[in-house]
Amino acid sequence: MMWRWNSNLPTMFRMLDEIKKEWDGIFFQEKNETPKVNLWRGKEGAILTAEMPGVDPTTLDISIVGQTVTLTGKTEEKELNEGENFHRKERKSGNFTKTMELPFRIDADKAQASFENGLLNLTLPQMESEKPKTITVKVS
């Protein structure tokens, strides 16, 4: 049997991909992927960056309790004009909550947040009482 290229195959593959995404959303619980974050530890604590396109920073809630940071907000959906339809829609809209636990307690009074070009930047300093202490050995 000889296989021939069918010009409808790319369209069929796209349709199968869309069907798989729909079925995965129905049968498998999706992880909360919004917002996408990078979190790393520095000398004085941790730095967190989060991608938040479409989020109004004035409505963003950042909660710090002990060693846990919670980001809560809402992404707005683009409203289409009459007669317009989405060709592809991958970005989710609606409310989100993302909670991350750090390996140390955070000094919430010294934490800082900035928002620029859809990117949230958090500086999360470690509590002084949790930082390692250096002890000098006395020689007699």
Image (tube, helix red, strand yellow):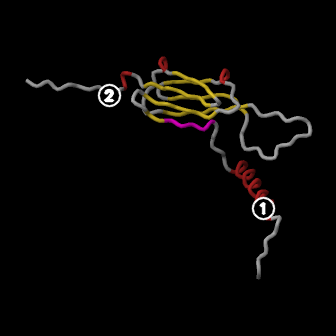
Q: Which residue is mark 1?
A: 10
Q: CA distance from mark 2 to mark 1?
A: 59 Å
**Magenta run includes residue 50:** no
Q: Residue furthest top?
A: 109
On the image, the x and y values in percent for residue 23 come to 74, 53
Is label 2 in contact with label 1 (beta carbons under 8 Å)? Answer: no
**Magenta run includes residue 38:** yes
Q: Residue furthest bottom?
A: 1
Mark number displayed over residue 40? none
Residue that appears at 48% across and 26% down:
124
Mark number displayed over residue 132? 2
As shown in the figure, which amino acid type bears the numbered disc 1? Pro
**Callout 2: 10 Å neighbours few (<14), some, many (20+)?**
few
Q: Is residue 76 left or right of residue 45?
A: right
Q: Is residue 133 left or right of residue 84?
A: left
Residue 6 position (above or below residue 27): below
As shown in the figure, which amino acid type bears the numbered disc 2? Pro
On the image, the x and y values in percent for residue 40 come to 47, 35
Residue 37 position (above or below residue 133): below
On the image, the x and y values in percent for residue 46 come to 46, 30
Residue that appears at 79% across and 65% down:
9
Split into 4 quadrants, where in the image is the C terminus?
top left
Split into 4 quadrants, where in the image is the N terminus?
bottom right
Q: Which residues are magenta?
A: 35-39
